[in-house]
Image: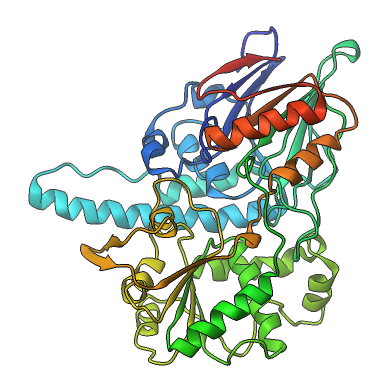
Amino acid sequence: MSPTRGPATLQFLGAAGSVTGSRYLLSAGDQCVLVDCGLFQEPELEAHNTEPLSVAPDQIDAVVLTHAHIDHSGYLPRLVRDGFRGPVWCTPATRALVEIMWRDIAQIAAADASLRGQRGHTRRVEAKPPIYTMGDVERALLLIKTAEYGSTTRLTRGFNFTFRDAGHILGAATVTFEWGAPREHIRLLFSGDLGRPHRPILHDPAPPPVVEYAVVESTYGNRTHPTGDIEGQLASIITETVERGGNVVIPSFAVQRAQEILYHLRRLSDAGRIPSIPVFLDSPMAAAVTAVFPRFAALLDRELAEAFARGDSPFDFPALTITQAPEESRQINDVRRPHIVIAGSGMCDGGRVQHHLLHNAGRPTSTVLFTGFQAPGTLGRRIVEGAPEIELFGETVHVRARIEQIKEFSAHAGSDEIVDWVRSIPNRPRRLFVTHGTPEAAETLRGRLVAAMECDAYTPVFGETVEL
């Protein structure tokens, strides 16, 4: 390729002033590396998903993914479609998850394009092509190379990176790049999405190494997670809803969140703390992701690893039904007794959960239970903020269901947890870059990090390039 030799630079092509679309272009020595390659999920930013990057894809030497979430990995097949041919590095578990997630996006995009094409034919409007095709996904998968936690991977002579466990979702990693001559040695850390300590299912985030620079996420940079009893809240919400004769609809992300909900429901069911009612996992992608977990038992807490070793999935129990076909999903709404439905998408902007909201959001007896972050502009955010009515499939639904949140479910570190993790860097970095948060969250965390670390911290803007 390669960029002109000179000072190392870092360009913020996403997740700068926003919570999604993580893309960071690192140019150092003779290497040009894209760290994360995500889709924007805030509605007002989705146009970026079909725009070309500021750098030609064939000028990028490699892509390094911190984890599988779509806002960190989902643009990659598009990058391949546009000409990228270098290696894509991630952990083995991330490789397993992105295969499921990218194929799901391609299938949905093809279906949406077909529907728009039919409408366009009728209205003489040109249909937009899908963001990428299944062929693009297959070509992207062929480029993936994997590296384990803790092992240093050489990209070129004198330019290396190391993954460490981020504790966020299965396979999630922080990544540290190292380059330069001994007297000019530079280490740059990306937190990716940082998980929380003392949580079930996954290991705690690994401590960071000595670094000169760090890019730190701030999704919850202005909030501290409550420390309430998840299972107590879950049991109370379910029991009260059943007593009213209603259903519990849980919009859920397919990766990690759905599995954590199943884990807690299994424990509550085993302990007799919730009524014996049907539970439906109405998400083929969540079902596929759940099947990946036994393959990576070494990444799980000992309790879960031992359960899988016994052949006893901690995500399964007698009341659970996993639905695959669309007709199975529709039949759930014919169930006349109280039940629980876990369905995507987690922010309610698409997927099967919208059908369950259509049937339940207007029922005073039912509950819509949110367990994850709702990005600004999403349907989930509007419901959480108390919208009196919502539009679904051309119908106006007056929201009469009880709206609940269990904020303790978050897989993102809260403000205190982020600060504690950054403070565990053994040295004082030259500069911290605060990204992947709303402007308010990023600026709040920046101030906290300056006070805690007594070092420079900066909130970059979209498209900005800084010198390292």
Q: Is residue 142 left or right of residue 91?
A: left
Decide which of 23, 17 is in the foreground and name it. 17
Where, by quadrant of the figure, is residue 257 drawn?
Answer: bottom right
Q: Position of residue 368 (x, y in %)?
A: 45, 70
Asked whether 184 or 349 is in front, the reply is: 349
Residue at 67%, 76% in the rendered image: 232
Q: Nearer the viewer, residue 92 or 321?
A: 321
Which residue sits at x=69%, y=66%?
A: 293
Q: Residue furthest left?
A: 123
Quadrant the N terminus occupies: top right
Q: Is residue 136 visible?
A: yes
**Residue 259 locus on image (x, y percent):** 63, 69
Give percent across and percent down for residue 79.
Answer: 49, 35
Rendered view: 199 above or below 215: below
Left or right? Give the position of 184 relative to 390.
right
Question: Count of labels shown?
Answer: 0
Q: Quadrant of residue 225?
A: bottom right
Give above or below for 366 relative to 5: below
Residue 308 is left or right of residue 336, and the answer is right
Residue beneath the point at 49% across and 53% down: 374
Q: Can residue 2 be seen in the rendering of this structure?
A: no
Q: Is residue 215 left or right of residue 118?
A: right
Q: Is residue 59 above or below residue 164?
A: above
| Location of the C terminus (image quadrant) | top right
